[in-house]
Amino acid sequence: MVQVTRVDGTTYEAHAKFAEKAENGNRGLASELLASLLAGLVRANVPRAEVVELPPGQLIALGDGSHPAVGLAVACETIDPWVDINAAGAILDVSVDDLALLSVVQCWTEVQDRGHNMIRSRDKVYAIDFASAFGSIWTGSAAVPPLVEDSLIQNRLAAAPLAMRAAADCLESVSNDAIDQAVAEVPNEWMDPSQKGAFCARLKTTRQSVAERLRSKYPIP
C-alpha cells in the first residue's frame, strides 16, 4: 500500500501495481487505468486508478521481497473497509442499479476472470482487477467478443431488465470526447499513439454495440 498525494495536496491510500508483478506487464497497467477511467464515465463502482511515478532513490519492497524498477505504476484507491465477495448471496441487498452499471463496464471492457474479483464495502460493491481487459483491441481482432457473464450478479440482473436497459442507456450516452480523453490519459510507455487510435475507434463502436446487445438480452417485460 502507498500514500498518493493529489494535486491539491490531499492524500489517499492506494494499492500500487508495478509492471514487474502486474498481469500482462505494462499492458495490464494500461488496462487497469483505462477501465477505471471508463467506469467513471458511466458512474460504475470501480476503484479510482491513476498513474504514479516511483522516483530514483525511493525503495519499495514488494510482497515477495523484490523491488520494482523506478518509473510509472498504477495506484488503485484502497476501499476501506472491504471484504471479498465469493458468492452471489453476499450481495442480495445491494442496489441492482449499481450491479447493472458494473455489468455494463465488464462488457464494454471485455474483462475476463469474473465470478470473483469483486469486493464489498458497507452497502457498495466494487469490481476490481481489470488487467485482462480489452483483449480484442490489444490483439487487433475484429471479432465481436461475447458479452461478459459474471456469476456473482447474473441472476440479479436477469430479474431486473429495466435496470440493465437503463445502464445500457448510460453507456450509450458517453461522448466521443470523453472516450478520447480517457484513452489519452494512458502513458505512451504503456500504449503507443497507434494503439491509442485503435482503442478510441473500437471503444466508440463497442459503446453502441454493447448497449444494443444488452437491450436485446434484457427486453422490456
Image (cartoon, rainbow, N blue to C red):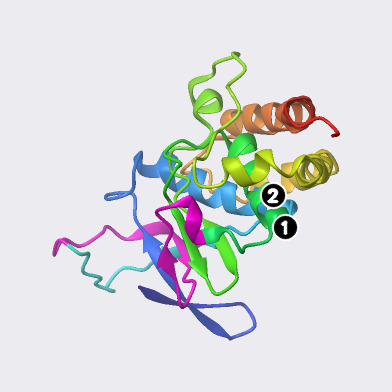
Magenta stretch in the rendered image: 64-90
Position of 113 compared to 20: left or right?
right
Instruction: Kindly identify which numbered label has been placed on residue 43.
Output: 1
Q: Is 112 rendered above or below residue 181?
A: above
Position of 15 compared to 220: left or right?
left
Q: Farthest residue in the bottom direction?
A: 9
Q: Residue at position x 41%, y 39% from top?
A: 113
Instruction: Kindly identify which numbered label has been placed on residue 101.
Output: 2
Q: Which sits earlier in the primary sequence, circle 2 or circle 1?
A: 1
Give the label, 2 or 1, closer to the camera.
2
Position of 189 compared to 104: left or right?
left
Q: Which of 197/37 is in front?
A: 37
Q: Is 94 rendered above or below residue 39?
A: below
Does dot 2 land on a helix, a strand or a loop? helix
Q: Is 165 rendered above or below residue 122?
A: above
Q: Which of 134/6 is in front?
A: 134
Position of 125 compared to 84: left or right?
right
State the image coordinates of residue 78 (x, y, percent, origin top left).
Answer: 46, 71
In the image, what residue type sits under mark 2?
Leu
Q: Are marks 2 and 1 in contact (CB under 8 Å)?
A: yes
Q: CA distance from mark 2 to mark 1?
A: 7 Å
Q: Which of 146/56 is in front?
A: 146
In the image, what residue type sits under mark 1?
Arg
